[in-house]
Amino acid sequence: MIIFLFNSEFHKKNNGMQKYILFIFLSYALYLNAQQAQNALTNFTKDPLLKDGSISFFAVDLESGISVANYNENSRLICASTTKLFASATAIEVLGKNYSPLTRIYVDGPIDEKGVLHGNVWIRGAGDVSMGSKYFNAAGHEFDFLNQWTDSIISKGIKQIDGYLIADGSSFGYDGAPNGWKTNDLGNYFGAPHAGINFYDNLFKLYFDSGKIGTKAKLVSIYPKIDNLVLDCSVFASSSSGDECNIFGDPFSYERKANGKIPANKKGFEVKGSMPDPEYQLVKEWASVLLLKGITISKCAKGYRLLTTTLKNDYADNFKLIFSHLGKNVGEVAYWTNHKSVNLFAEGLLNYVGYVKQGNGANKASIDELKKYWSPKLDITTMIINDGSGLSRLNAISASHFCDLLSYMYKSPNYADFKSTLPIAGVSGTIKNLCKGQVGEGRIFAKSGSLDKAKAYSGYVETISGKKIAFSFCVNNFSCTTSQLVNKMEVVLNALANY
């Protein structure tokens, strides 16, 4: 081989043979690297701490379509937040990265010469998840859009509303959380369901003062203020370094229970919970801003879900659009969905699709649209998907399902937009510590997923040899700690990066 490379005279006479041998040599080297990945995976599956667990793994070369490594690739498991890949890919494919939901404000009556609106003001929700979100607003400025809305009302000459101020998110239904979400998740901020009207990330904040270890923490404030909230607190000071507090409560219920531990000797320690009814909370907050600027409301602020009058929301005939609020686009929302694993955003992306395609943003209609789009393109007949975020314990998705999706997106005109939403191993997002300082750093672009006894990664690998791989790696019911499992998974991921 050395003779072929360095004897120039021989090189001239035997160039074809040299290329052939070089091809064989490189092919064999790639084979060895692929075998290395398969060997690493085989060793992983034989780990005694995983003997009672379930594993699904698949890695495929995106150019050749050849399997690089596999194990139970068709086994369907609970895949946690990697489910967000289906939600974000569907929204990008069906709606495009530039689609933005439009919240529209209507009046349903005339405005007289004195500035009295003889009718109601309606907020027609389109599922926007970005209103007042911390991901798109500086701290302390999340409610600024309500001042802008109020200025728009004033600019129309309205000084008094002789009727209701109504928030209407009915186009997305009032089903609450998707099927399979645990009761233990629902009261926490990450378990806030998506709705037709969302704001402030659909959360509220509790602030506690804690004393010595073992003493009960004192609740000092709640933001935003939630009318009629019944809160049972059993939160204690401990030696913990962070938030070990859980909040329990169902959607639309004003009963919440907070228990657990927070660090000792803290002032104003923050714990976040899910807002009981964002639709009503938004309209209540806006009513306060209107009153501060001198605009009175004869009746009251109401969420459409609780509206007991015979008012119709057909947005026709006497309904007049007076201004609109444009939300952040799909690309921007998808970035945070996958980088920070925001459950509310994932559900929003999925539900946007149902709303645009059917005029119905409810979970079931949106799942139907997801399946309708992918069924002709991917074999998803055995896939079970109940939500966009992966909080549902009833989801059942295999590594081959994910690799099929990733392979399709690789060939899509939207590939660059989709890939840009993925965190980078050792660098950013939820995988900034994955493979840190190892060969996989900077080469793995993936979504992570974590639930009780479920850990997953799915995405792309750009290998040291220039190959591009789609992979999916999911483990359920492992016996070790999550951090121990991640260390074991890194060995396999680094072997992929070496391919």
Image (cartoon, helix red, strand yellow):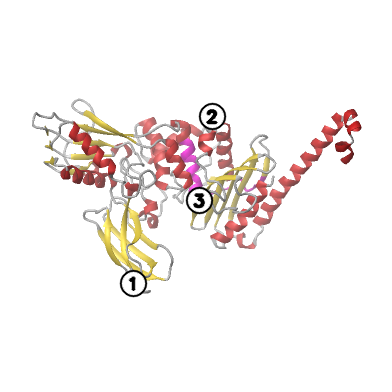
| Residue occupying image coordinates x 87% and y 37% | 6
Q: Amino acid at mark 2?
A: Pro
Outermost residue, left side: 114
Mark 1 → mark 2, Cα distance in angstroms: 57 Å
The x and y percentages for residue 458 are 56, 45
Mark 2 → mark 3, Cα distance in angstroms: 26 Å
Label 3 element class:
helix
Q: Is residue 49 above or below residue 391?
A: below
Res. 15 visible in picture: yes
Q: Quadrant of the C terminus?
A: top right
Pointers 2 and 3 in contact (C-beta within 8 Å): no
The x and y percentages for residue 295 are 14, 40
Q: Is residue 204 magenta?
A: no
User: Which span is picked out in magenta?
Assistant: 69-90
| Residue occupying image coordinates x 38% and y 63% | 245
The x and y percentages for residue 1 are 87, 40
> Looking at the image, is mark 1 or mark 3 earlier in the sequence?
1
Q: Nearer the viewer, residue 78 or 222?
A: 222
Q: Is residue 71 magenta?
A: yes
Q: Nearer the viewer, residue 66 or 151?
A: 151
Mark 1 → mark 3, Cα distance in angstroms: 33 Å
Q: Is residue 18 above or below residue 472?
A: above
Label 1 element class:
loop
Q: Which mark is residue 413?
A: 2
The x and y percentages for residue 103 are 30, 35
Q: Which residue is mark 1?
A: 211
Q: Amino acid at mark 3?
A: Thr
Q: Is residue 366 rendered to the left or right of residue 38?
A: left
Q: Which mark is residue 430?
A: 3
Label 2 element class:
loop
Q: Amino acid at mark 1?
A: Gly
Nearest to the eye among marks 1 and 3: give it.
1
